[in-house]
Image: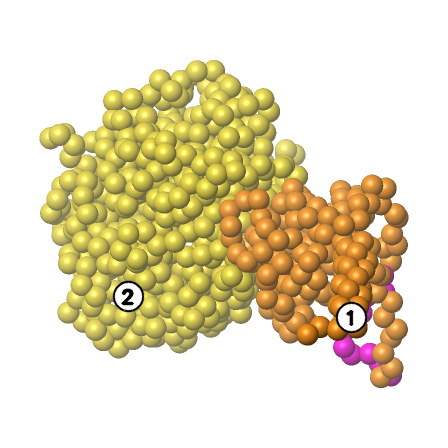
Amino acid sequence: MTGRNAPGFLLLIISLNLAFAACARRENSQPSGLPNRVQNQPTGAQQTGVETDDGQWTMPAKDYASTRFSSLDQINSSNVASLKLAWSFSTSVLRGHEAAPIVANNTMYVVTPYPNIVYALDLTQPGGPVKWKYESKPASASQGVACCDVINRGVVYADGKIFFNTLDDYTIGLDAASGKELWKTHVGDINKGETMTMAPLVVKDKVLIGNSGGEFGVRGWLTALDATSGKIAWRAYHTGPDADVLIGQNFHPFYTQDKGKDLGISSWPADAWRIGGGTTWGWISYDPDQDLIFYGTGNPGPWNPEQRPGDNKWTCGIFARKPENGEAVWYYQFSPHDLHDYDGVNEQILLDLPVNGQTRKVLVRPERNGYVYVLDRTNGQVLSANPYAYITSSKGVDLNSGQFLYNETKNPQAGKVIREICPAAPGAKDWQPSAFSPRTGLLYIPHQNLCMDMEGLEANYIAGTPYVGANVKMYAGPGGNRGEFLAWDPVKGEKVWAIQEKFPVWSGAVATAGDLVFYGTMDGWFKAVDAHSGQLVWQFKCGSGIIGQPISYRGPDGKQYVAVLAGVGGWSGAIVAAGLDPRDPTGALGFVNAMTDLPDATTKGGMLYVFALP
Amino acid sequence: MHSKKAKFVSRNGRALLMLIVVVSACKREQRQFDPPPTTTNPAIVQSELQPGGAPQPQTSTKSPVEENANALSDGKRLFSLYNCTGCHANGGGAIGPALMDETWIYGSDPASIHSTIVEGRPNGMPSFRGKISDYQVWELSAYVRSLSGQLRKDVAPGRSDDMNVHRSEQRVERKTPQQSTIPKAAEQP
């Protein structure tokens, strides 16, 4: 650093300190800032790390605890029937829209699937006209290494900046006011099969990002970039030696099976960890009290499990890490030696929960393998794991040893078709995030009801091409409905109510203080249901199927709005978004077989819808 | 009552039939242990618009394997071994487009498919130049064409060694190839 820059550097330190001080003040003032009703807990489940709701929606999960709860209550069950479309906006992209619209400083930010255009829409003007547009122009070849449609799960806003990932492995920082590119960092390689689809999370001065490509034999990682410069601060791999995984002396996993030196090498056949997957394409939560981030790792590669005997650490599990330097604090493996593509990347909601008469700091996770896990988030202990879907592939979780108990009759084998494996490869729930209402104490889980037939095949590793080794056919589970939207009581560990949907519920959910929950269906219905009873109270037919994440925000006019992106696609909607042939049941890794009637129910087209009371 | 003449005709007919079977089976059953080098500079025309009206002479390179059942069987195996199935599934498509339907983005003739595999295509089809031998590329191209019923039924593979996913290539409905009207690249800004 030259002397000339020193005053600037000082200023930066001062402003960072000010920012931290502001954070601390905000945290301290929490209790008084909360609406009274939020503190009355009907069931005893409490949201932790509650940030005062200023009516904005700056990150896809709404807050660090990942509640997706809006404390706005203008729209409620008594007036929701008159909810109307306020305005809409075409993204000009036709593939699957999984992103959450982000709202900050009276501006809405939307990122499209490939080619990853970011739009800033001016909420102070009627109809939300475009304030600026940023075209990231990803390499068109990157479309060829995106396993499950060319989707993107959203931007994040922090400190006057917008951060997002592109399909061809760049993380980009933009000036939120002007759309000017501040930095652009190349973090992965499409020629190894790496892409990026997740929404970043910003913790203090770090932008946290991860790679996709579990179906291409990539080596999964989580990386922290400096929010100001875009430079890589640290990277933690999810396979290989402890030094690469950032496992050091402060690593204290709860269970014996996760203890030992270099398990990321010894739990694999020789060198298989180099192409072993364990990617990070889901959700990260942050607990400011413990100063820990929590996030999961994806499936091991290839799918054919016979090619990778061992526990395949650290795939299909959850890490707690220090955001400052990335060091691992604890880890738990949901699906050791994964057999069925049960990635461990789902959202974790941070709550304070009464367990056996004691309030515990927990994280609640509707896991892909079909169980809602409640983990002590201070040490990674499994407190409970109750099924929320139809399961044949496992018998449960041993709460003493933490071991996942597979049903061996459903283990895939090469050259043999194993039938009725439930849940199917996308799990009982895939990436689509649930919402938690502190008013009802319930978790609202959008998910699917699918089973599969699977045959293992020999997978050849050719860098940059798929590394799967399986023939898969999916179909509806018991009942015939392929989707379900359910309310879950995390204290009792049981289902409260459920709505059956024809297609997988592939959209996120948002819960509001008006005691409503919003979600969308793949045939294009955007629905509001009563948070207590699950009764349908309002619906609107969008132009295309909905797989995006709904949000709610307060506009500059003081009114409450609800917004969602429509635009069918994703893994489940690939048959429409990519025009696949329904005669091949193994299309889209076997999802086509379960979705042959989707082309009759919807067409493609990316569109933002914003609703308000008249 | 049958006359001698009728018997003669029938015997001759049988012989003729045998001859036809033998002749056609000749290529079908041929094993090429030392595959000949093939030219890979086909003149491919992908547009119906040809200035001046006079169509360009199309000198499509003839595939050396399209009438050979053994090559097709190899092609089916290679389609899985080179991870083509990872993107195109068993013809229905996934990351890449379906290959069993009538829509062709970059041409349905053997030479076009050959060059698609070797050169790659801009929206995600990798270039396999230098990765797959030329003869195997022809075997793959032929197999790709069999997925939509473009080849003779007695040449296309009749069964699958793995999970039965759809009608065999031998029994698949023949689709008349059509050029894609909306190229993938034009769908997106």
Q: Which residues are magenta?
A: B42-52
Q: Is residue B76 left or right of residue A364?
A: right
**Amino acid type of the residue that numbered disc 2 sits on in the rendered structure:** Lys
Depth check: give the residue in front, B183 or A614: B183
Residue drawn at x 53%, y 69% as measured from the top left: A92
By what rule are the colours in the image chosen? by chain
Q: Is residue A499 above or below residue A525?
A: above
Taking the spot 65% from the left edge, 34% from the top edge, the residue there is: A2
* Chain A: drawing colour: yellow
In percent of the image, x 74 and y 59: which residue is there?
A: B113
- Identify the residue at the far bottom of this view: B53
* Neighbours of disc 2 within 10 Å: few (<14), some (14-19), many (20+): some
Q: Is residue A517 left or right of residue B13?
A: left
Q: Do the residues at discs 1 and 2 belong to one chain? A: no
**Alpha carbons under labels 1 and 2: distance apart:** 84 Å
Q: Which residue is mark 1?
A: B4
